[in-house]
Image (cartoon, rainbow, N blue to C red):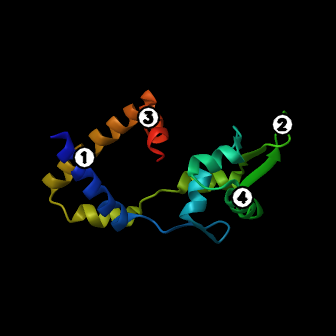
Amino acid sequence: MIRAAVATVLECYPKIFFACHRTHVRDEKAKRVLSLRQAGVLDHLDAVESTHLHELAAHLGITASSMSLMIDRLERDGYVHRSRDKKDARRINLRLTAAGVRIKEQEKILDADLVKAMLRRLSPEERESALAGLRSLARAAGELVDSGQASRLQQETGS
């Protein structure tokens, strides 16, 4: 029974994602467009707590040199501040600027208008059932993350 449920999620989630995902993030204030990859990097950073460049690269599964190039552009465009670690000058600390925080707060993976169009295709009963299911899946996902099991399984499988 759980195997069929897994197969259903693996089959259905990509259809929803591909139908409704955003292809870029628009910074209206700066009149600039960021790729989803760039916005995803910003999503992993904070304005107060620094993140080390090499750790972020490893977490996202890209090389440190590729991450450095991406950070170069994000820094040039005013979204990221880069500094040397005070305790270890070999380490590069990354923090969001105010502009980076603004993008992080507005950035959503799914486009609200496309989600609205998708939901309008459902009857009120189907919509409520679908939303109840999503709430349950989100709750279970949160519990998985909070327990630490998600990161352990990701490390074991290389995801």
**Nearer to us: label 3 or label 1:** 1
* Badge 3 element: helix
Q: Residues within 10 Å of mark 3 (few under 14, many from 20)?
A: few
Can you tell which of label 2 and label 3 is closer to the viewer? 2
Q: Answer above or below: position of 81 versus 147.
A: below
Q: Which residue is mark 2?
A: 88
Residue under numbered circle 4: 65
Going from the N terminus, do you reach mark 1 or mark 2 first?
1
The residue drawn where x is 71% and y is 40% is: 50
Which of pointers 3 and 1 lies earlier in the amino acid sequence? 1
At which x and y percent is residue 86?
85, 36
> Of the residues shown, which amino acid type is indicated by label 2?
Asp
Which badge, 2 or 4, comes first in the chain's sequence? 4
Question: Disc 1 to disc 2, how far (Cα)?
Answer: 45 Å
Question: Which amino acid, mark 1?
Answer: Val
Q: Nearer the viewer, mark 3 or mark 4?
A: 4
